[in-house]
Image (cartoon, grey):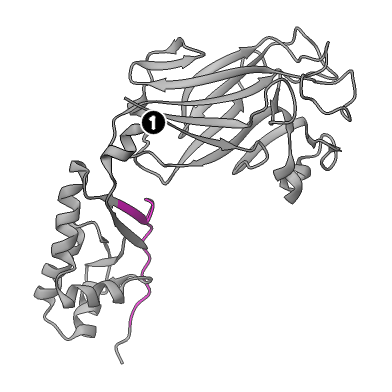
Amino acid sequence: MIKRRKHNITISKPRDTVLYIGNEDHTDRITKIGKAISSPIRLQILDLIKSSPLSLQEIADTLHIPLSSTVLHVHKLEDAKLVVTEKQPGIRGTMRVCVSAFNSFTLASLNNTLDSVEKTVSVEMPIGNYFAFNITPFCGMADENGAIGSYDSIYSFYSPQRTRAQLVWFTKGYLEYRFPNIINPLLRLSAISFSMELCSEAAGFSEHYPSDITILINDIEIATYTSPGDFGARRGKITPKTWANGQTQYGLLKTFFARKDGCYIDGHLQNMKTTLNDLNLKDYPYISLKIAIKDDAKHIGGINLFGKTFGDYPQDIIMNIIYE
């Protein structure tokens, strides 16, 4: 039996890859993968290192092939980005250790004509389906029947019932939502936008209570909107009758755009330094949206976020992917 040492390699990038035949940017990678997996020996190497790293010498000893041949095979796999290698301390100097860089890769073919018909693709995310959060009380959430959990308790934000939320509020911090990255690489992306109904968060309500609400896409700050107040002087048009007067009733519908020439709020340019190309939209299988009240905001006035059965507008958070 061959005695193996324990090795560790950290892989930071996503390990599930989709490659499209019609995308010229993917052609070189597809070709290299095809060449890399055309060899039975290289397939055996991938199977050996699919979950645990091995040194090149360990691979050579296990497969009973020369070390020089192992080096060439691993180089082919590395060139196709199917393995990751790094130098680590060995018994005598350093050694190269490698591990599989993927869980899966999918070769896809899309119909460019059919996909081009629809210029905008929309995904609606319920406000309670956040992926992560880091918030400061005052905070809470409610559905059509009233409060979910306890007011001003962060524990409520971990509740399984949060997915029913139709109103969410907090004073400072952020909620992060992760939308599926359904951008078609065969089409030219023109813009991405997020629309939502929101307002400030005051005790009870206050029509004049500014709050700086910052929007981030893939952790890139695109714009800050100053909400003028927490609106409760009239009832929201669709706010449930069970929700008492004297509390937050409705918000304003705001749309945040990232385009090739900058970032916009409701069609008004806010930020020319950050553009669509800065958002790393090809890097992840999801698109991250953070809605934040920053620690250093000029106006820390909290936020109320409305779902489709609260406020004035029957919608949750809507992401639009817009093609040319």
Residue at 63% across, 39% down: 133
Q: Magenta segment, which residues?
A: 4-18
Instruction: Decide: few, some or many residues near mark 1? Use Cα within 10 Å; few <14, some 14-19, many ≥20.
Output: some
**Which quarter of the rendering shows the N terminus?**
bottom left
Q: Is residue 58 visible?
A: yes
Residue 17 falls inside the magenta stretch = yes
Q: Which residue is mark 1?
A: 279
Residue at 31% across, 72% down: 49
What secondary structure is the magenta-colored segment mainly?
loop
Query: Could you tell me residue 26's position as x and y percent?
Result: 21, 47
Residue at 39% across, 52% down: 14
- Does residue 61 lie above or below 128 as drawn? below
**Which quarter of the rendering shows the C terminus?**
top left
Numbered circles on residues, count: 1
Viewer-closest of 72 and 324: 324
Give the side of residue 296 with respect to residue 74, left or right. Answer: right
Query: Could you tell me residue 174's position as x and y percent?
Result: 62, 32
Q: Residue furthest top?
A: 208
Q: Residue furthest bottom?
A: 1
Query: Could you tell me residue 242's position as x and y percent?
Result: 89, 30
- SS of the residue under disc 1: helix
